[in-house]
Image: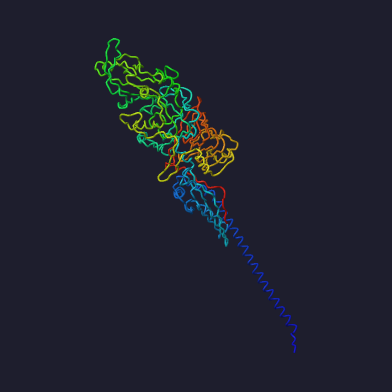
Amino acid sequence: MLTLIPKKGVALAVAISIGSILMLLAVAMFSFINNQHLGINAIVNGEIAHFLAEAGINRCIPEIRNSISSALSTNPNNKKLREILLTPGKVKDTDITKLLGGSWNKELEKFAKETDETAAIEVKIWLRELENSETDKKVWADPIARRGFVVIESEGRYKTGKRKIAIKRLINVTNILPGFMSKFTMFLTEAGNNGTKKYNIIKNDYKGMVTDGPKPLILYNHLTPETPSANSDNWNFDEALKSEQNEDIWKNRGWIWIGGDKIRLNLCSGAGDLGEIFHFYDVSKVNDFSPIRFSTPENLLPSSFKNINKIPWDKTASIIRTVSYKFGHSFVLDSFHDRSNRKSSDAMYEGGILSTEELHEHGSKSSVLHLYGDARKGFQSRTKVFGNVYSAFIRFSNLEIEPKEPDVSNIFKSVFPPPLYLLRSIIEKDYSNSIDIKEINQRICGGPMLKTGMLFNNYSEYSSFMSKIIEQPYVYSYNNMQEIYTNKPNRHFPPSKTILSLDTDSNISLRRDNHTFFEGKPSASTALQTIESRVHLEVGNIKEFWDKFLNEDQELDLNAVVRIKNSENLDFAVPPSNLPQPLKVRGGGAILLDQGSIDLRGVLCNSANEALTIASTYGTNIYFSSNLPNHVNIIAPNAELSYSSKFILFGSLCAKNIYVDNRFQGGKIYFRPETAPDSSFSDSFYKVYVSTKDSYWNE
């Protein structure tokens, strides 16, 4: 039987169903809106946290870059960071936040709290992925030079939001000195080309004073009182002289490389500021020296010198007599001079002791290159010389005559000045056994009436002992000076011990402690390669360089290795004409000039801990337009050192050649011992460069 539901019940059921649905819908809508609101809050909080983290990055970057760059100063607060950056070997990833000593986290915390009590910013700085960048010993192996990243991690927090941003910036630790080239006072790649005698153009007198015309270029290969150095104030004259007794002193000095064909440097006469006679004699005072006599040992003389010889004496015109004589041989050494009180040119050939053939071959002018300093005590600067370099000087040979009969001996000894029997220079075609050997001033003094054949069997024997111009490797003077400084009795020439000898094509090895920096044959192109590999940033032209790196005080504040493209091929004047001279260097560095010559007008480093290296890849000239000092290392293997003003350079010079003519004003180059790679002080010349570009961004 069908039962009917009342109409009122149906309506109630429908109403309840609809109400339930609406209730569920309302709950769902409320839940959705609430979740959406929470999501929006989370997004907003996250964005604010992101902005806070970004603010931390932007706030810290300049200070962090400056802090890291200054870490290589002598500031004791940076001692730990300095140790991390300058310790040879691999560097593990390191948190350096506390080492930088910055106040940015406190400032950032204060800034965040001003935004909201829940807001916070924290920045951490890391050194990551630091790896050695110079490892090839045939180029340059620096155990400290490295590349990696400084990573700045900034975390921002705001309520429930948290964001971390990390950026990487490239960091370079590089030395601003020119690799192995900083061991050389001068490195000339083609100095020996275009003529053996081309450097012999100075017209000087016997005292070594230049009267007119070109002037010498003098190299000082060791520390002097003038040299910019942390130790120059402690320079001690007595200690400097004492150190000269060390036969290996060359190892601690700047070396000299002269490439190309053979060159011959005529040593300058005298003991003045420009004289080079100190190569052979002890010069106690400038302009005051006495040539010493070198005696030839009897066992090296012809057999006739070992016997008593009976020879008619020179008074035969009044009394015919044969006298017994004993002969010996001695000589003195002298150098080149062109002028005297009696002759305005070729004065050293006066008297005919030297031959006209030698005049034609050697001339009488001396060299513009003085490689071993000057005659002053403490400024004589012997060192290692590489290359086919010879020195030329004079040997005046004398017969030592001893009459064996007392009355003749008394007559002979009473003559003043003492009789002098010089063995004249004779060329082979003019030689005979009947040439007279007479007292040089034609005096009758009881000496022998002597012919060449009485003592010498032939020309070969005579030429071994006659007066003449001698050539020897320039570096042999190092050995001569060793005997002077050790006060060796009975000195010999050549010296009895050969410490350094001719070295025309040598490999070198530069070491400090147990590390080898370089091993192989040095070349200017290799030095350029080292500098090129260190470039931190580039600028397009010279104007852009000065605009970027001059500070408000018009000082060069570089602290980097910078390449100047200079496609205009303009000369790089340092300083430019619109700046005062000398240019002051606040922060040193290295400059690589792609094109253009170098024009130096005076450069002064404010500290002995700073250096400036200027390299030119294709520049053709090096000019000095001022006589002001220049604290610069120059690497320009395709350039000639050209005449302009007399100059002073403190540093190392690498060039192709020196252009010399009668206008050459010369100058002085002072080696800086503390910049040599085998000096521990060279560690003072590292620079840390942090790039201005973000190489990696992570959120």
The total number of labels drawn is 0
Q: Position of residue 298 (x, y in %)?
A: 30, 26
Q: Position of residue 532 (x, y in %)?
A: 53, 42
Scheme of colours in the image: rainbow
Q: Residue at horizontal 61%, vertical 62%?
A: 41
Looking at this view, name the residue that lies furthest to the front. 457
Residue 227, above or below 337 = below
**Residue sitting nearer the eye, 275 or 519:** 519
Q: Which quadrant, please, contains the C terminus? A: bottom right
**Residue sitting nearer the eye, 438 or 46:** 438
Q: Which quadrant, please, contains the N terminus? A: bottom right
Name the quadrant containing residue 157. bottom right
**Residue sitting nearer the eye, 673 or 321:** 321
Looking at this view, name the residue that lies furthest to the top. 318
Looking at this view, name the residue that lies furthest to the left. 406
Q: Position of residue 9 (x, y in %)?
A: 73, 83
Residue 338, above or below 15 = above
Q: Position of residue 124 (x, y in %)?
A: 51, 54
